[in-house]
Image (tube, rainbow, N blue to C red):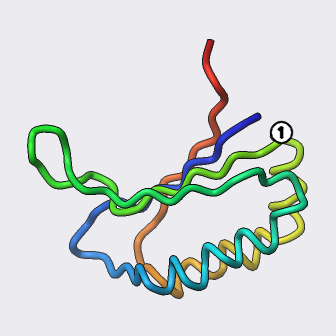
Amino acid sequence: MIVVSVSYPNDPATRFDEAYYLQTHIPMVKQRWSGMGLQSVQVLRGLGTPDGGPAPMRITALLAWDSTEALGRAVEAHGAEIFGDIPNFTDGRPVMQVSEPAG
């Protein structure tokens, strides 16, 4: 299993339409990639830091996949559509990372 994190920095200078993201973008991700190795999607809203500071990330989505190969096939099949939808809810740039369980 691998996990892809897609985080959107909490930059007040950028636009982020959370309603569109939650009601349109995430359902599209689930619809296109479920059945292609996507196991689950969890969306986290940044609240702040432990010391009371502002959250460095506005939203983080955690996408659990069967394998890097499944991720590659899914991106090949629907990546252009999904990544092309990003400007519909933000003018910021997501920070993406592929991770694996440690230990």
Q: Position of residue 56 (x, y in %)?
A: 27, 52
Question: In the image, is 36 to the left or to the right of 29?
Answer: right
Q: Position of residue 4 (x, y in %)?
A: 63, 47
Q: Is residue 69 above or below residue 23?
A: above
Total residue callouts: 1
Q: Position of residue 36 (x, y in %)?
A: 89, 58
Question: In the image, is 43 to the left or to the right of 79?
Answer: left
Q: Residue 42: which quarter of the image?
A: bottom right
Q: Is residue 98 above or below residue 47?
A: above
- Who's the residue at 79% across and 54% down the image? 38
In the current view of this chain or complex, which residue is farthest to the left? 52
Element type at marker 1? Answer: loop
Question: In the image, is 82 to the left or to the right of 22?
Answer: right
Q: Looking at the picture, which amino acid does disc 1 mark?
A: Ser
Which of the two residues, 8 or 29, is positioned nearer the viewer here? 29
Q: Residues within 10 Å of mark 1 (few under 14, many from 20)?
A: some
* Quadrant where the N terminus is found in the figure: top right
* Quadrant where the C terminus is found in the figure: top right
Q: Position of residue 52 (x, y in %)?
A: 9, 46
- Who's the residue at 77% across and 68% down the image? 79
Q: Residue 27: which quarter of the image?
A: bottom right
- Who's the residue at 73% across and 69% down the image? 30
- Who's the residue at 85% across and 60% down the image? 74
Badge 1 is on which residue?
67
